[in-house]
Amino acid sequence: MGTPGQRGYCGGVPHHASRHLAEGPRVGIRPFTHEDAAEFTARARESKDLHHPWLFPPTTAQAYTAYAGRLIEDPTKAGFLVCETNGGAIGGFININNIVEGGFQSGALGYGAFAHAAGRGLMREGLDLVVGYAFGPMRLHRLEINVQPGNAASIALARGCGFRLEGFSPKMLFVDGAWRDHERWAITAEMISGPGRRRGAGGAQT
């Protein structure tokens, strides 16, 4: 499936980063590239206190190469860098994992802001863009976010972007040395395209 320079899945994500896939007033989203290693890992190191104990993005060039390689090459994944339109700085990342085709057309989201971008609303805009891209060019139908109950910032972002709480799963994922409980949040294409919905930054409606 797909064409040279593109991810095979659903018409997918280009491997190059010559342009944003979607753009809002303050941020655009684009694919990961191996050339982003220096900036990404530097920002991840600067953001360790912000990220712990919820997520652990790569902080070395070697780890980034493996991480980005999976997002670029694996058809069940799609990675997006959230970049400021003014200057291009990487403000965060949003990944769609466990992409399933067929009757599901679904994926699981993971995301994180970097410290310099936290609290500025950039990830809200970026997540709107990714949702719009996933339900548009990628032709997905459902996106879910699994969040530890104590991760208030991540829950607020999910709620603010229109995701609904679907349930609670004890000991769902192995994170930071233990099996952790998670809340399950999700959004479907119908939730952003129904009557009376308001179109947001990423072409998504709220």
Image (cartoon, rainbow, N blue to C red):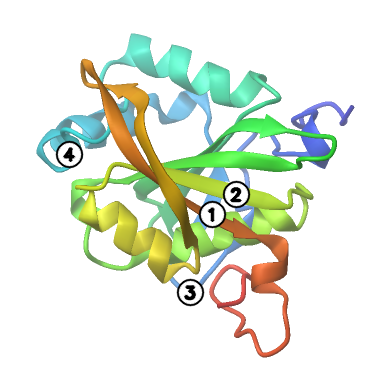
Per the model, the C-alpha gap separating discs 4 and 1 is 27 Å
The spot of residue 190 in percent (x, y) is 72, 68
Q: Secondary structure at mark 1?
A: strand
Q: Are marks 2 and 3 in contact (CB under 8 Å)?
A: no
Q: Amino acid at mark 3?
A: Pro
Per the model, the C-alpha gap separating discs 3 and 1 is 25 Å
Within 10 Å of disc 4 (Cα), the crowding (few <14, some 14-19, many 20+) is: many
The spot of residue 75 in percent (x, y) is 71, 24
Q: Amino acid at mark 4?
A: Ser
2 over 61 or under it: above or below: below
Q: Are marks 3 and 1 in contact (CB under 8 Å)?
A: no
| Residue under numbered circle 4 | 47
Q: Secondary structure at mark 4?
A: loop
Q: Which mark is residue 25?
A: 3
| Residue under numbered circle 1 | 186
Q: Name the quadrant of the N terminus.
A: top right
Earlier residue among tags 4 and 2: 4
Residue 56 visible in the displayed image: no
* Left or right: 46 in relation to 63: left
Per the model, the C-alpha gap separating discs 2 and 3 is 24 Å
* Left or right: 14 in relation to 182: right
Q: Are marks 4 and 1 in contact (CB under 8 Å)?
A: no
Decide which of 29, 180 is in the foreground and name it.
Answer: 180
Of all residues, the one furthest to the left in this rendering is: 49
The spot of residue 10 in percent (x, y) is 82, 39
Q: Name the quadrant of the C terminus.
A: bottom right
Query: Which residue corresponds to the image point at 44% horizontal and 50% vertical from the top-left?
Result: 167
* Left or right: 190 in relation to 205: right
